[in-house]
């Protein structure tokens, strides 16, 4: 029999976040009391005004195809949002709506990368960046943002990583998995390098609304018109409005790139789901009270749970500024409890302590695990208690 699979998919690695979530669900279905800290989605339902808008659109018969790049009314809602929240001005032909921010990123890499083009990806990174770059024929180039640097890369690191083949750098702020945020000054320095070296900036801002303790999100596209012109902003309503399953994301940027993305979508997905688009119009045009309520709930959980995680033996953890994740370095805990790797340690936490966490190897940070605090405070406290008990019971020396 001839080869069944294309070469492009042979190097793909499954999403570690989805794999752990599936394993935890499987154990729960067996009656095991597993607490899942792997979720990459808010534990709140979509706000009621958004649900009502979706139902209303269906009742009005608004259930047909839309333009491949998004409803005009949704594009306008996105334009208004970017103006209101980020002081950015765009036109409709600079906006492309896709089937979630993940699909938008995938489509973006497909249209900007030629075989062998390099994309600089800071470590730790969201699990899908490297795979999407590889699927487009590109080459991921990793630059480590150490814990000492707040899990962020420096301008010198960026400059050193750029070659003649470099096409773009990805900036994810607030970050999944670290929760850290680039300041305006840090972004200015990175932008200067990008401008001097003539590379694109992919700015993933999906967690922009989830920021804590007075820290502000700033979009690199806000710096200057020249930087905005080389930046593709990627965002959506999944995290901000608890709409992960609705699958609506968007890109804002260069008209040539946006047109190419729209054309590609017209041959792959057609339009994003019509009902979800109308729901997103309400998400951006309607009340934002629920967005703030969720942000406050996440901040409250962070303040409650962070000190307890930091007190677990062998855990070293920076306090995140945004998103809803903790990324403790647990290399010492793994070693002292007799495990040869952090992956093995995380597996034992699931099977013996009944707590599901995501090994940091999926994010390029092998010494870490990711803990999501997108669950109730009661479950968070019980999960941390279980982890603490597990580590102390196995600690050697």
Image: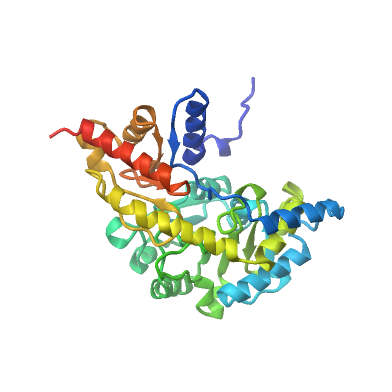
Pick the residue in front: 89 or 198. 89
Write the residue at 37% across / 40% down. 382
Pick the residue in front: 155 or 90. 90
Pick the residue in front: 290 or 227. 290
Q: Quadrant of the N terminus?
A: top right
Is residue 374 shown left or right of residue 106?
left
Q: Where is residue 93? Give x, y as percent.
A: 72, 69
Q: Which quadrant of the view contains residue 206?
A: bottom right
Q: How is the image coloured?
A: rainbow
Is residue 330 shown left or right of residue 295?
left
Q: Where is residue 237? Give x, y as percent.
A: 61, 58
- Picture mark count: 0
Write the residue at 36% across / 62% down. 153
Up-down relation of residue 39 to residue 150 (above or below): above
- Examine the rendering and report whether any part of residue 118 can be seen: yes
Up-down relation of residue 183 to residue 302 (above or below): below
Q: Which quadrant of the view contains residue 88?
A: bottom right
As drawn, the residue found furthest toward the front would be 378
As drawn, the residue found furthest toward the bottom would be 224
- Examine the rendering and report whether any part of residue 170 can be seen: no
Is residue 208 shown left or right of residue 70?
left
Q: Quadrant of the C terminus?
A: top left
Q: Where is residue 13? Give x, y as percent.
A: 49, 37
Write the residue at 66% across / 50% down. 246
Q: Where is residue 97? Give x, y as percent.
A: 69, 59
Q: Which quadrant of the view contains residue 49?
A: bottom right
As drawn, the residue found furthest toward the top would be 1
As drawn, the residue found furthest toward the right would be 61
């Amino acid at each position: 029999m001839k080869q069944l699979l294309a070469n492009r998919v042979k190097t793909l690695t499954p999403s570690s976040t989805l794999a752990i979530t599936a394993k935890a669900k499987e154990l729960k279905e067996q009656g095991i009391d597993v607490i899942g800290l792997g979720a990459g989605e808010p534990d709140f339902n979509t706000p009621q005004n958004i649900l009502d808008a979706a139902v209303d659109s269906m009742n009005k018969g608004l259930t047909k195809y839309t333009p491949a790049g998004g409803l005009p009314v949704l594009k306008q809602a996105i334009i208004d949002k970017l103006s209101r929240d980020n002081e950015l001005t765009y036109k409709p032909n600079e906006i492309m709506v896709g089937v979630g921010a993940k699909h938008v990123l995938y489509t973006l890499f497909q249209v900007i990368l030629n075989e062998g083009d390099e994309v600089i990806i800071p470590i730790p990174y969201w699990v899908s960046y490297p795979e999407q770059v590889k699927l487009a024929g590109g080459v991921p180039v990793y630059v480590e943002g150490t814990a000492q640097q707040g899990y962020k890369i420096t301008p010198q690191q960026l400059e050193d990583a750029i070659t003649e083949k470099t096409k773009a750098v990805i900036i994810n702020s607030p970050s999944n998995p670290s929760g850290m945020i680039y300041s305006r000054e840090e972004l200015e320095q990175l932008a200067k390098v990008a401008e001097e070296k003539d590379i694109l900036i992919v700015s993933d801002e999906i967690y922009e609304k989830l920021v804590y303790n007075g820290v502000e999100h700033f979009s690199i596209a806000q710096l200057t018109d020249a930087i905005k012109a080389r930046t593709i902003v990627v965002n959506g309503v999944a995290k901000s409005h608890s709409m992960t399953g609705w699958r609506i994301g968007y890109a804002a940027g260069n008209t040539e790139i946006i047109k190419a993305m729209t054309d590609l979508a017209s041959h792959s997905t057609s339009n994003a789901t019509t009902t979800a688009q109308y729901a997103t119009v309400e998400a951006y045009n309607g009340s934002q009270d629920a967005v703030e309520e969720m942000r406050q709930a996440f901040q409250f959980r962070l303040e409650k749970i962070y000190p307890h995680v930091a007190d677990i033996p062998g855990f070293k953890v920076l306090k995140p500024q945004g998103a809803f994740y903790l990324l403790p370095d647990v290399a010492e805990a793994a070693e002292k409890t007799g495990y040869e790797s952090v992956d093995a340690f995380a597996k034992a936490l699931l099977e013996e302590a009944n707590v599901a966490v995501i090994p940091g190897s999926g994010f390029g940070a092998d010494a870490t695990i990711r803990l999501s605090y997108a669950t109730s405070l009661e479950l968070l406290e019980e999960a941390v208690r279980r982890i603490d008990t597990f580590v102390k019971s196995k600690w050697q020396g």
